[in-house]
Image (tube, coloured by chain):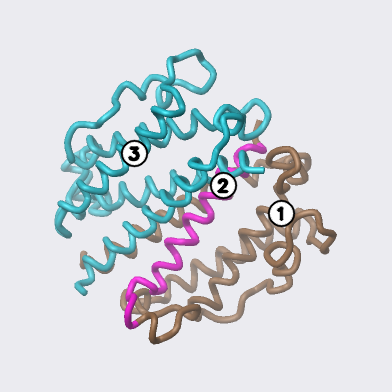
Chain colours: A cyan, B brown
Amino acid sequence: METKDLFIDMALKAWYIQLARTSELINGFTDEQWWGEIAPGRNRGIYLVGHLIAIHDAMNDILGLGQRLHPELEEAFVKNPDKTGFDMPSIELLKQYWKDVHENLSSQFQKMDADEWFKKHNAVTEELFAKEPTRNKLNVLINRTNHAAFHLGQLRLLKK
Amino acid sequence: METKDLFIDMALKAWYIQLARTSELINGFTDEQWWGEIAPGRNRGIYLVGHLIAIHDAMNDILGLGQRLHPELEEAFVKNPDKTGFDMPSIELLKQYWKDVHENLSSQFQKMDADEWFKKHNAVTEELFAKEPTRNKLNVLINRTNHAAFHLGQLRLLKK
């Protein structure tokens, strides 16, 4: 295996591990857990799951993959904190969005060749990228994986 | 920059970002936060910090870097859950261990060349590694980075 393919394989594996753990956890959530706070006064399950869906969906823009599926989630789950009264989809819809957004990303990732992952992403300028070649698409994936792990650690607290 | 070096640079950057965020957080902890539970009935700050120190220190064994500095932490912070009565060092000592363990790792990492990171780690057999070359030392670093992010998400809840 070429070194480049090996890295991509490692980074994708880490991403899919975090997603699989999160999927398993939230698929087992009761309504009480979806609506429950991870700690007194903190974010609710529904907010953190919606937040992860919206942030992952936005990778379509940053990685130049195509249109995101649910830009309407930005308002309630990214731009504003939890419990500020913005409309949220039902739990059933969010479960469906979780599935759709990740299936879409997964199919987009399969179309990317190794060189594509090492190109500049859309949230960095050409100038900065010339100086910092680590600011590539694969790095976005690595950062999003850590971000997912961060919130998975919190969502875990909803499980008894 | 060679692709191999680039990828190691990306993985190390992600590792140091998680560590810097965690250091900043715990350096600002009050005694109440160190001894507080992340959520009612859950792990305390002191336990999670000790857990991260012990798991990171154990990377010395898994990556074949040398002796770990504080094997005595295994009992209270890895082998057993929190609040089971095992001896824990003082907060002051833990802060020092946090610093020492990460400085030690950092200086060991600086001595590793690119090829070294792609060699098999010590928790996988030669046979399995031949089939799965992603089970290399760099992959341990990537997994530990996600593990740190997972617990950082929880430690954050101690901050008001």
Judging by the rendered image, the residue that carries numbered circle 1 is B47
Query: Label 3 belongs to which residue?
Result: A56
* Residue B148 among magenta residues: yes
Which tag, 1 or 2, sits closer to the chain's start? Answer: 1
Query: Which residue type does callout 1 highlight?
Result: Tyr
Q: Is residue A19 left or right of residue B36?
A: left
Give, as a single range, the part of the protein colored magenta: B130-158
Amino acid type at mark 2: Leu
Camera-near label (3 vs 1) is 3
What's the chain of the residue with tag 1? B
For the C terminus of chain A, the quadrant is top right
Q: Marks 2 and 3: same chain?
A: no
Label 2 SS: helix
Classify A82 as above or below B31: above
Q: Nearer the viewer, residue A36 or A38?
A: A36
Specify whether residue A84 is painted magenta: no
Extreme top residue here?
A85
Q: Magenta region's main secondary structure?
A: helix
Q: Give the x, y percent position of residue B2.
A: 21, 67
Disc number lying in front (2 or 3): 3
Q: Give the SS element for disc 3.
A: helix
Q: Tag 3: residue type?
A: His
Task: Please tell me how crowded label 2 is: few (under 14), some (14-19), or many (20+) other residues with Cα within 10 Å.
Answer: many
Q: Quadrant of residue B96?
A: bottom right
Residue A151, image x and y in percent?
Answer: 50, 41
Q: Are marks 2 and 3 in contact (CB under 8 Å)?
A: no
User: Badge 2 is on which residue?
Assistant: B152
* Image quadrant where one finds the N terminus of chain A: bottom left
